[in-house]
Image (tube, rainbow, N blue to C red):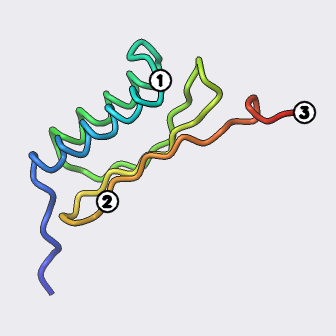
Amino acid sequence: MPPAPLKDKFERVKDAVEILTKLQEFGVPISEPGYKKTKEHLDAWIADGDRVSVQIPFVRIPRTAHMTLPKEKGASTTYVLKATDAAQPT
């Protein structure tokens, strides 16, 4: 069985731009450390195409991002902001 085709650089850039745009639409400033860390992971993924699965804490908003960046063509990227314990009402 041949290996699955890999996402090309164009597809990775498109996925990365979509994630960063959604974060800005959500109101996350580009100065937020979590945004910067997300961009670092996306830049590395665009460059090498290796699969990424990581959790990124956001300092200014009580959230943690759960990000999965696949290497296979047709596989979807996943980026979910989940509330942290600090965001839970007591």
Q: Do the residues labelled 1 and 2 touch (CB within 8 Å)?
A: no
In this picture, residue 48 sits left or right of residue 21: left
**Front in this rendered view, residue 2 or 34:** 34
Q: Quadrant of the N terminus?
A: bottom left
Question: Which residue is at 31% across, 59% downward?
Answer: 76
Q: Disc 3 marks which residue? A: 90
The residue furthest right is 90
Mark 2 vs mark 3, CA separation in Å: 35 Å
Q: How crowded is mark 1: few (under 14 residues within 10 Å), some or many (20 or more)?
A: few
Amino acid under disc 2: Ser
The mark that comes first in sequence, 1 or 2, is 1
Work out which residue is located at the far top of the displayed protein and give it. 31
Residue toward you, 88 or 39: 88
Residue 40: where, in percent of width, then height?
A: 31, 28
Judge left or right: residue 10 versus residue 33: left
- Give above or below for 83 relative to 33: below
For badge 1, the amino acid type reads Gly
Would you say 55 lies left or right of 25 here? right
> Which residue corresponds to mark 2?
76
